[in-house]
Amino acid sequence: MNALFSQLVSVAFHGMAYGMILYIISVGLSVTMGLMGFANLAHGVFAMAGGYVMLTMMNTYGVPFPLALAIAFVAVALGSMVLERLLYARLYSAGELAQVLFTIGLILMAIAVARLIYGTLQQPVTLPSYMQGQINLLGRDFPAYRVVVIIFSVLIAVLLWFGVERTRWGAMLRAAVDNRSMAQSIGIDTKKLFTLTFALGSGLAAIGGGMGAELLSIQPTYPFEHLVFFLIVVSIGGMGTLKGPFVAALLIGVTDTACKYWLPQFGAFFIYAAAIALLLWRPAGLFGRTT
Amino acid sequence: MATPSIVAITAHAGGYGADARIKWTEWLPWIAAIAVYFFAPSYLPLGSYILILILFALSLDLILGYAGIITLGHTAYFGLGAYVAGILAKFGTADPLIGLVVAAVAAGVFGLITGAIILRTHGLTLLMLTLAITSICYEIANKATDWTGGADGLSGISMNALFGQFKFDMFGNTAYLYSLVLLFVGWWLIRRIIYSPFGASLAGVRENAVRMHAVGAPVYRRLVTVYGISAAIAGVAGAALTHTTQFVGLKVLGFELSGDLLVMLILGGVGRLYGAFIGPLIYLLAQDALAKQYPEYWYFWIGALLVVIVMFAPGGVLGLIDSIRARFRKS
């Protein structure tokens, strides 16, 4: 009985850490989709780029972990801003197929570039000493790295919630999600709003990629390998909300960890089946608005 | 700046107004294919692979170009057809025609069931579901090693001679003609569908689903129907691959093939019927010549090609030809 209980705690804990990483990465995708209606399959590229930037900073230049993460955030956010202005913005009205093809093209190019610079092997992660080892909580040992991941991600989620629900930028964002042309006609500069939101979402993905480098290893096929999971989070959560992806990412993180722990022979089978069943019940996702 | 629609609305869009008679240019691909048989026999194995992928691309064009269903998981049906044909040949009957029928029915039924599930959604969710279904099929094929051979692939298939007469020889003579005939039948069927009222209603759904609802068209039922038909055709293409190569690898269910297929169709031109002919031909010939030495660079250029097509040449190769012809006519 006690053994089962500690298994449950362990699975819930690891699942939570995994789910939080999924959330930090996917929330930007959900917002881009809800705000601009842009099917950005290349979102994982930003997460991968974040991971590479962070690990290069740490491994080659000896930058400490928190600073490397901040650099990854800024670098990827700025880079994505350039991409958005140059390429993405031209396709906002182009229809879904064009967006899907364009972003698949970006993924293929990103994979090739990553392979050229870093090779096919996954990047080594050396965690700072305070993230190695265990932390003792309530008489149990938990890996420190995952504790940090969870706390940090919850912090980001709270900050995001505050930003979207309580600030002027958030009010403009919500207005634009609800009704873009109305928001435009009362003088909200949606173009600027889009660019900033896109950069923020990509920057968050970079943080997720960097933070989660130990969980989702950084290697060139990253954007394709985890694409389905990012999409599942967004679809199940519902587009354009903050709460949706949070709940969905937790659910998926815990379910997937549980399946891999108790039924490893089935691989990712159950998570796909569960996602299909859930969307059969609610095609617009758990918190999505039916249009 | 409004980017032009990536789907052709004029050429072979079908519908009531369109002239359904076969133009002389439409015979050219067939003449070329027969010429290859007589004049370039060393290309027959690659040729029959190209013909099969053209059939597969046609099935994708039917749902993507005409019905506007964006999918990244069409290999589910292709792979199912390939595995059904392989398993049937190994453990049941090795007659190719029976194999074709069984594969078509299996893939078609699977297409109807999965279509009924996924077509209730749209956008990213639909994309995700197509990926998820293919991934499930891949997992099953990978794990059910007794039936599918798992990662090693299903080998030891030996097909009976076609009609008891034509053996699948190692030079690919029978395989090539077999693939060509299947492609011809598939092309004829899809062409009929496109020019039928049913095809016109599909184009209507693609262009404006809300209005199709408003005029009382059963949108969902139409989409599921065409999805099932397309899945059956993809299944036949998969079965043909098994019959001609006498081997099934996990690749037939892989994401890579789905992506490649999409790129081929886009390269040729979506919703143009003959884009599905030109795309695989160019793509596979180029791949055969270039990709083997530098696979990394190959995919970089494919990615760049996709971006360029989307930005500057949304109609693919055929779209470019159309616009060049239009410019000449003006001057």
Image (cartoon, rainbow, N blue to C red):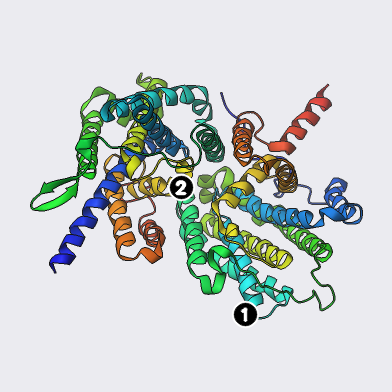
**Label 1 environment density (alpha carbons within 10 Å; few <14, some 14–19, many ≥20):** few
As shown in the figure, which amino acid type bears the numbered disc 2?
A: Glu
Cα separation, mark 2 vs mark 1, equals: 34 Å
**Label 2 environment density (alpha carbons within 10 Å; few <14, some 14–19, many ≥20):** some
Find out whether the residues at labels 2 and 1 contact each other: C-beta distance under 8 Å: no
* Left or right for A288, reference B301: left
- Which one is in front, A206 or A195? A206
Q: Chain of mark 2?
A: A
Question: Residue B187 sits in which quadrant?
Answer: bottom right
- Which one is in front, A278 or A42? A42
Question: Residue A180 sits in which quadrant?
Answer: top left
Q: Quadrant of the N terminus of chain A?
A: bottom left
Q: SS at mark 1?
A: helix
Q: Position of residue A238 (x, y in %)?
A: 35, 46
Q: Position of residue B125 (x, y in %)?
A: 44, 49
Q: Position of residue B199 (x, y in %)?
A: 66, 53
- Which one is in front, B309 or B214? B309
Residue farthest right in this picture: B39
Residue beneath the point at 51% across and 34% down? A110
As shown in the figure, which amino acid type bears the numbered disc 1?
A: Phe
Residue beneath the point at 37% across and 47% down? A290
- Which one is in front, B281 or A170? B281
Residue beneath the point at 67% across and 45% down? B264
Q: SS at mark 2?
A: helix
Residue farthest left in this picture: A138
Q: Position of residue B30 (x, y in %)?
A: 84, 53
- Marking on residue A225: 2
Q: Chain of mark 1?
A: B
Residue designated by label 1: B91
Q: Is residue B300 above or below residue B188?
A: above
Residue beneath the point at 10% across and 48% down? A137
Report whether residue B146 is seen: yes
